[in-house]
Amino acid sequence: MPMPDSASSPVAADRDTLRDTLAQDNSALARIGPILLHLLATPDHSLFSDEIVARIRGMCHHLAWQVLRAQAEAAGQSEREAFADRHGEALAEHFVSSPALLAHCHALALEWQLAETLEARYGIDPVLAPLVQDLIAADDNALASAAMASLTAQARFAQTQRRMELPLSELPGDLFHDLLLAWREYSDQLRSDAMIRAEAKLRNNFDEGAGRLSLMARVVAGMGQGGLRALDIDRAGAALFLSALAARSGQTRIATVLSTHPRQTVRLALGLRAAGLDSADVERQILRINPQADPPTGISELAPEEARRLLADLPLQENS
């Protein structure tokens, strides 16, 4: 009977612990959607961050307002803002019932909260991070252009988050399409000529590639192997860091945003390892994001491919 490998047994135990913790963390994250939906439907937010709830509500209201204003404009109404204000709250509540849209808005609110925390704690500019400045001055014209466009988009993001707004143009393409379908559903499929014209105009004007998330992804792709530099949150800032972590770890951007929560340290550690950081840098980034965190053991024994496999085996159900 072969003897067990004493050197590998602790490593296997660490992997099992990481897997079990990740599964538990996923279960906790799966409860976020229903909790948010309940909180958005009630005035008492004492058990949840008032700021996050208010920001999500504000973004959904702004989305509804934009759609309704387009409808009023297509109908030739003179009091377009009044029309949007009159129907905005009901349509926004209808939008909130979409788990995918709710998850997206929640992630944006958490990202902005992280950016503000980093600015207050370390003085990291939420718009113009040092790495972005370097990329704008890069010899690669395509990369420099993408970095400049992402800077402009990040400045818009900062402005709209401070106003608790979300432009339609900043939605991912699938969410933009789903939102327009939800608008139709809200109208009981009774689409007037004005609604048809408004929807056609909104679709014609929509360009997913010009959105902030697409531009950030383009910058990360343009950096190639140098994209590892974007995993230093002090130099990259929150936005580029999160996009690089998503791209290099094989996770969605929503999952990477959620991994920065203090109770999701295992997911963050696995993501950073999967993205190519060594264990010392993984720990450093975790502690920069959450100074009170307790970095998990066993990460140093995992190859990046193993960390990526663990994350793939236990994916986060974002739209539950």
Image (cartoon, rainbow, N blue to C red):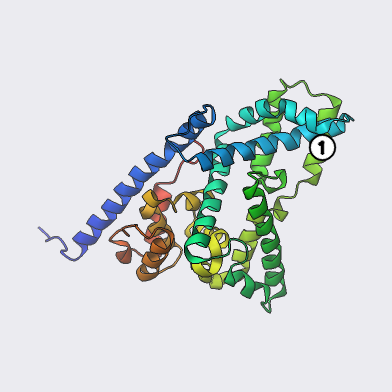
Q: Is residue 182 visible?
A: yes
Q: Is residue 241 visible?
A: no
Residue 44, position as x, y percentages in the image: 48, 29
Instruction: Place residue 236 in its image quadrant.
Output: bottom right
Which residue corresponds to mark 1? 200
Q: Is residue 270 left or right of residue 126?
A: left
Q: Quadrant of the N terminus?
A: bottom left
Instruction: Place residue 284 in its image quadrant.
Output: bottom left
Indicate the amino acid at tag 1. Ala
Q: Nearer the viewer, residue 224 or 239?
A: 239
Q: Is residue 122 left or right of residue 131?
A: left
Residue displayed at 53% across by 56% down: 116
Residue displayed at 54% across by 35% down: 99
Q: Nearer the viewer, residue 264 or 45?
A: 45
Vertical comparison of 116 with 143: above or below: above
Vertical comparison of 32 with 214: above or below: above
Instruction: Place residue 7 in its image quadrant.
Output: bottom left
- Provide the secondary structure element on which disc 1 rests: helix
* Residue density around tag 1, few if under 14, some if 14–19, many if 20 or more, within 10 Å: few
Residue 97, position as x, y percentages in the image: 57, 29
Q: Residue furthest bottom?
A: 139
Residue 54, position as x, y percentages in the image: 56, 38
Q: Residue furthest left?
A: 1
Tell how many labels. Answer: 1
Residue 146, position as x, y percentages in the image: 69, 66
Residue displayed at 62% across by 66% down: 128
Q: Nearer the viewer, residue 95 or 190?
A: 95
